[in-house]
Each structure stands twice: as C-alpha cells, then as structure tokens.
Amino acid sequence: MWILKYKLNKIKAELADDQREILRFAQDKREFKMALKVGDKAPEFTLPSFTPSEELAQISLGDYKGKNVVLLFFPQAFTGVCTTEMCTMSDNFNSYQGMNAEILGISVDGTFVQKAFAEKNGIKIPLLSDFNKEVIRKYDVVQAEFAHGQKETAQRAVYLIDKDGVIKYVEVTENPGVQVNFDALKTAAAGV
C-alpha cells in the first residue's frame, strides 16, 4: 500500500511540475510578440533625437498622423552599410516628401552618437535613439548579435506606414550587411 501512495504522490508532484511549466509557457507566449506584417497597426512610440535640430526633441510616430512614414531601423551609426543607407535616404528625402512621406531612422545608438553621425555625413532626416531597445522589441527587429559581439542592436529593416498608421510595406534583412531594397520601398511608397 505504501508503494502505491509513494507512486501516487510522485505522479502528483510530476503533474504539479508539468502544470507550472505549462503556465510558464503560456506566460512566455503572451509576452512573445509575433512579427509585424502588412496590414497590422504600427506600434506607437516616442524617442529622443538631436537631428536634424540642435535641441533635443521627443519624436513620436503620432506626430506624423495624416502622413506616410518610412521607418528605417539600422544596426549602428558609422558602419559602412548603415552610412550608405542613411545617406541614400537623406539624399532622396525630397522625393519621399513628394509622396507625402516622412523618413525616420532608428538605431540603438545614443543621441550624441547619432548627432555626430548626421553632422559628419550630412544626414538631414531625423535619427531617433532607441537606446533602451523598447521600439526594436515592439517592431520585432532585434539583431541578437552584431559586430564584435555587440548584443541587441536593431536589425536592418524598413516599415512603410500609411497616414492611418497601418503598415503597408515591410522588409527585414536576415544579414545586417545586406542593404534594403530601395527600389521596392520607393514603389511601395508611390502606391500609398
């Protein structure tokens, strides 16, 4: 009889462990965010920026309600591909404004680094600092590891958000050394 009680208690303990594991798994699933896709509402955010102004400004996605917005996530200022990307978009700023679109660059660099990066390269679009990595998590564009073992930078990604806050185009590159498709982005922006 005591063997049966022992086995029964062991089974109850295992079931309790399994139930705790299931609850932890369910909690993890609630916290896990699915990748954003075309048709989803773009998550709101507010981030600091020194660019293009001299004074620190808090810039929100909501500030651009009624306009289309191109969000460019880039891993790190002063790297080759990121410099090319930001300079290309800055140089094409007027053509996007002609499509009622504003361009915002977002990285986990601090505001002072972004300011120096913009000044050195003549970048005229606002660069927003997601130093606390909140927005890259909201948009599910966390690069687990970047150059030299740096953890949790932004992936290279672009989101085109329409005037109503709905995502109309998404591109996330698997490799941070691969540039976004500027032609596809421009075509998508022209169609919004």
Image (cartoon, helix red, strand yellow):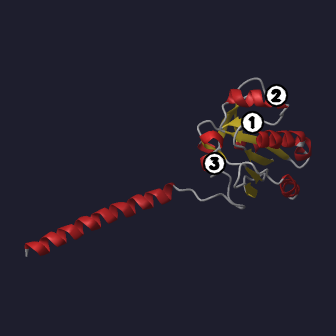
Instruction: Look at the numbered disc 2 and give the secondary structure of its residue.
Output: helix
Residue sitting at 74 percent across and 52 percent down?
A: 159
- Picture quadrant where residue 3 is located: bottom left
Name of the residue lying farthest toward the left: 1
- Residue at position x 83%, y 34% in the image: 123
Q: Which amino acid does label 2 sit on?
A: Lys
Say whether residue 176 is visible.
yes
Q: For the residues carrying marks 1 and 3, which lies nearer the camera in this image?
A: 3
Relative height, residue 2 to residue 149 (above, below):
below
Q: Assess disc 2: are there few (<14), some (14-19) or many (≥20) residues with their C-alpha within 10 Å of its C-alpha.
A: few
Q: Given the image, on which type of amino acid does mark 1 rest?
A: Leu
Residue receiving disc 1? 127
In the rendered image of this protein, does residue 113 appear above or below residue 86? Answer: above
Q: Distance between the residues labelled 2 and 1?
A: 13 Å
Label 3 sits on residue? 143
Q: What residue is disc 2 on?
A: 120
The answer to which quarter of the image holds residue 24 is bottom left
Residue 169 image point, x, y percent: 77, 57
- As helix, strand or loop, the secondary structure at mark 3 comes to strand
Residue 1: give its label.
none
Q: Tag 1: Cα neighbours inside 10 Å, few (<14), some, or many (≥20)?
A: many
Q: Give the secondary structure at mark 1.
A: strand
Q: How far apart are marks 3 and 2 (CA)?
A: 25 Å
Do the residues bearing badges 1 and 3 touch, measured as CB atoms within 8 Å?
Answer: no
Q: What x and y, as percent, mark residue 180?
A: 79, 52
Quadrant location of the C terminus? Answer: bottom right
Tell me which numbered mark, 3 or 2, is placed earlier along the sequence.
2
